[in-house]
Amino acid sequence: MSRLCVHTITTKPLSLEQCLAEFPKRGVSGITIWRQALEGRDLANVKHQTADAGMEVVSLCRGGFFPAKSATVRQKAIDDNLLAIEQAHAIGSPLIVLVCGAVPGQALVESRKQITDGIAACLPAAEAAGVKLAIEPLHPMYADDRSAVNTMRQAHEICDALGSPASVGIAVDVYHVWWDPELKAQIDLAGQTGRLHAFHICDWKTPTTDLLNDRGLMGEGCINIREISDWVDATGFTGHREVEIFSHKWWAEDQSLFLDQIASSYGNLYA
Ligand code: ZN
């Protein structure tokens, strides 16, 4: 259980304080904090609270959403990412996950160029703050408005275009990339290039009834999670395995019961 991390969005009905009280009871040692969970809070205090709870802050979710048709809106996105970098630094998060963005009707190649430019504009601040950035490729069903980066290969291409700075890497989320025939090779490459910054797990349900909020608990679906996880570990990755589940079904349940299920399905997966 020492590598189990849970995202605050996974137990969305719980406040940050409730997460910090409930997660450790199940042996969860890491927490990825979504920015909405920080609203109205003193960030230095959040850093102390997480440390007092014995929890390691694994990452801050999320930055990104760089592409836009107007330069003004693109600059707003960069400003928001600069704010995220300040927030990450303040709460002691070593990493920000980037959901890179896309604009319906704008060519994906143009969006990827804007993403590359957006990350480049944030890089000096990220490096000064000691905060890494992780590009998370999203499943192609989100290529219209959530991310023009849909494969690990494309994420690598952006890292290459940026000149392979050590502070920019990739977040591998099984939900988004499990179908990719190049997955193992691209994970190997991420290991070799020092770009494997984060690993997210959940499951793909059949049928999936909601494109965003019907993710499954590990074991509820068809993803070869353990095999992908072994590929990730084979690169030398020793970071947390982050449970990130958006689910109307699970959010409607007793979150205490849901956390018990997360711990047991994680235990089964890594038994
Ligand atoms: Zn993810």
Image (cartoon, helix red, strand yellow):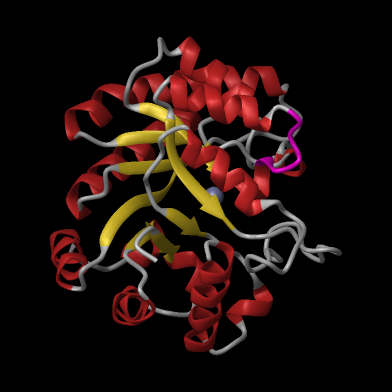
Q: Picture coordinates of residue 174 (x, y %)? A: 62, 47
Q: Is residue 106 left or right of residue 20?
A: right
Q: Looking at this view, is 13 or 19 the one in front?
A: 19
Q: Picture coordinates of residue 6 (x, y %)? A: 43, 64
Quadrant assignment for the N terminus: bottom left
**Magenta span main SS:** loop
Q: Is residue 13 left or right of residue 148?
A: left
Direction front: furthest residue: 271
Q: Residue at x 54, y 40 (%)?
A: 172
Q: Is residue 108 left or right of residue 37?
A: right
Res. 104 image quadrant: top right
Tally the numbered discs: 0
Q: Picture coordinates of residue 53 (x, y %)? A: 21, 73
Q: Is residue 69 visible?
A: no
Q: Residue at x 20, y 34 (%)?
A: 130
Q: Is residue 45 left or right of residue 1?
A: left
Queried whether the magenta region covers residue 197, the answer comes back as no
Q: Is residue 270 above or below residue 168?
A: below
Res. 19 image quadrant: bottom left
Q: Looking at this view, is 147 or 169 the one in front?
A: 169
Q: Picture coordinates of residue 62 (x, y %)? A: 44, 48
Q: Is residue 98 above or below residue 195?
A: below
Q: Magenta part of the protein: which range?
A: 177-181
